[in-house]
Image: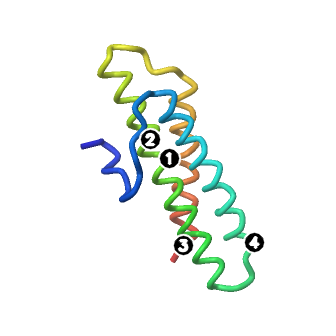
């Protein structure tokens, strides 16, 4: 099992670190878009729906960033500072999304 939890149902875990990071980057970008839509929403239904989508995307990105770091650790490679930074920034988005949804 991954330290960040199991992948969500339907999420296929990429085989390479590069693929994990690319997929995590995509989830992170989508999470940011949904978070902005949630913050800008004038009705509760959209606010909650977009906030939940943001939360889901940031969680998926976190799982993938963690898996990439674990794979590098297991192979004895150094985790690049850029990956650690992506992990940290995504965690901030995850915290913001959690505060955004009821």
Q: Which residue is mark 1?
A: 61
Label 4 to label 3: alpha-carbon separation: 13 Å
Q: Which residue is mark 4?
A: 40
Q: Nearer the viewer, residue 1 or 39?
A: 1
Check if mark 4's residue and mark 3's residue have beta carbons within 8 Å: no
Which tag, 1 or 4, sits closer to the chain's start?
Answer: 4
Give above or below for 34 relative to 86: below
Q: Which residue is mark 2?
A: 64
Q: Residue at x 46, y 51 (%)?
A: 60
Q: Is disc 1 placed on a helix, strand or loop?
A: helix
Q: Which mark is residue 50?
A: none
Q: Is disc 2 placed on a helix, strand or loop?
A: helix
Mark 4 Cα shell of 10 Å, populated few (<14), some (14-19), many (≥20): few
Q: Which residue is mark 3?
A: 101
- Looking at the picture, how far across and down is residue 47, in whole percent? 64, 77
Which tag, 3 or 1, sits closer to the chain's start?
Answer: 1
Q: Residue at x 52, y 55 (%)?
A: 94
Label 3 to label 2: alpha-carbon separation: 22 Å
Mark 1 Cα shell of 10 Å, populated few (<14), some (14-19), many (≥20): many
């Amino acid at each position: 099992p991954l330290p960040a939890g199991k992948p969500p149902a339907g999420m296929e875990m990429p085989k390479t670190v590069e693929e994990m990071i690319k997929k995590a980057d995509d989830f992170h970008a989508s999470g940011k878009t949904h978070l902005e839509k949630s913050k800008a929403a004038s009705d509760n239904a959209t606010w909650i729906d977009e906030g939940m989508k943001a939360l889901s995307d940031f969680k998926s990105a976190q799982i993938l960033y963690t898996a990439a770091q674990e794979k590098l650790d297991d192979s004895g490679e150094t985790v690049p500072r850029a990956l650690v930074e992506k992990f940290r920034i995504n965690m901030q988005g995850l915290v913001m999304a959690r505060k955004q949804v009821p």
